[in-house]
Amino acid sequence: MSKIYVTFSTFFFALILCATAFAVSEQYQGRIYQPGKLKAIDSESVLKVGDKAPDFTLPSLSGGPVSLSSFAGKKNVVISFVPAAWTPVCSEQWPGYNLLRASFEARNTVMLGITVDNIPTLFAWTTDMGGVWFPVLSDFWPHGEVTSKYGVLRSNGVSERALFIIDRKGIIRYIDVHDINERPKMETLMSELEKLNN
Amino acid sequence: MRIKWLTIPATLLFLICVSQCRLPALFAGDTPAEGDMFPELKLPLPQEMHDREYLKVSKDPFLLSKVDSKVLIVEIFSMYCPHCQKEAPNVNALYEAITAKPGLKSRIKMLGIGAGNSSFEVDAFKDHFKIEFPLTTDEALTVCTQLGVTGTPHFFVLWKKPGGWKVVYSKAGTIGDPKAFLELVRARTGMGHGK
């Protein structure tokens, strides 16, 4: 009987834990895939702060290709890799950057958003979130090639949730390969950007 | 034998929870519905002095029961939530409609709680949308868990009663037309026209 009681208690408390999920925007109700808790980081780093950032050219949502080298000597670049469209944390990371566009511009910085999704998927997803001000790039084919060059391709073919800050000389100044289940804090990124100007 | 007698009501409680897909308030996480008494909340004091004066609170953290108002509209939002961003001008219009009427300004107050947001993130939301009513943080999602709120925005309208705040409106999603929403608030809190 006590075995039944223990089983019941375990199941019941598991149910309580399931009920305390992270708040998700009502805008996406029913359209967000819930992957559950994932392994925090599932890749091997290949780059470090101080390295030259690997150049790349990827197709963008706006139509034309975007190359990292096109910003050299002109702007700092923040690359935001997010794992996948239509997933909970990603769907509430990029909309936050919309509110801080002026802060990015004041620091002479552009953001590039990259996922391994294809362009039609990215179009539907970003339209649903109300659009973003920065270029959204697809690393769909060859699958995850750029993501892999940056050492943030997970074993299941999606990217890590990662931020890279690259200065105007093309040097990596900050890397945050974040726990995929959590959203990076905005103040940390802004504080790292501030250091570029000092 | 004693375990057997404890197990039967516990199993019944479990089956009720599963069948209703919700947890009882006893264990928290049950979103307060219309007619419920709102749980006491402990919240970080807003940073700006005029926001503290508006709510008439001074201790950090402050208790929601200490907010000086007949009615309190609480919005659970997130700086990252696109729907909250889209809704912000409507919520500002609601605040303006309330403050435009001298008879309502001191009787209906508003408070935003940033779900999972840091002070920096709440401030970014406040600055971007030029929000004039107080916003505070729920960085660790303690309040959201306590309220069982899993989607943003979520609006509560609370009416002060001798025993605490009574919920007269609780809904996830937008408020719709701000003027119509204000009429709804007034109607449900005995503040109809002429009152």
Image (cartoon, coloured by chain):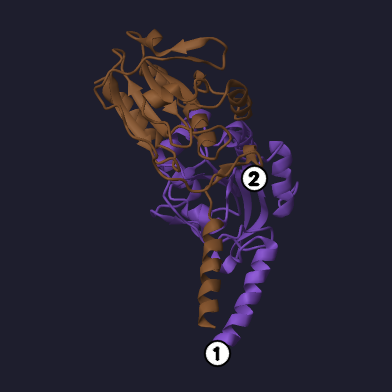
Chain colours: A brown, B purple
| Along the line of sight, the residue nearer the viewer: B98 or B82 | B82
Quadrant of res A72: top left
Q: Is residue B103 left or right of residue A73?
A: right
Callouts 1 and 2 in the same chain: yes
Amino acid residing under circle 2: Gly
| Along the line of sight, the residue nearer the viewer: B58 or B170 | B170
Instruction: Give the residue at x 63% y 38%.
Output: A28
Quadrant of res B123: top left
| Along the line of sight, the residue nearer the viewer: B147 or A161 | A161
Which residue is denoted by mark 1 in the rendering?
Answer: B2
Chain letter belonging to callout 1: B
The C terminus of chain A lies in which quarter of the figure? top left
Report if residue B163 is visible in the image.
no
Report how far apart the C-alphas of labels 1 and 2 lie in the structure.
60 Å
Amino acid residing under circle 1: Arg
Chain letter belonging to callout 2: B
Residue B182: where, in percent of width, then height? Answer: 69, 43
Residue B99: image tag: none
- Earlier sequence position, callout 1 versus callout 2: 1
Which residue is denoted by mark 2 in the rendering?
Answer: B103
- Give the structural element (helix, strand or loop) at label 1: helix
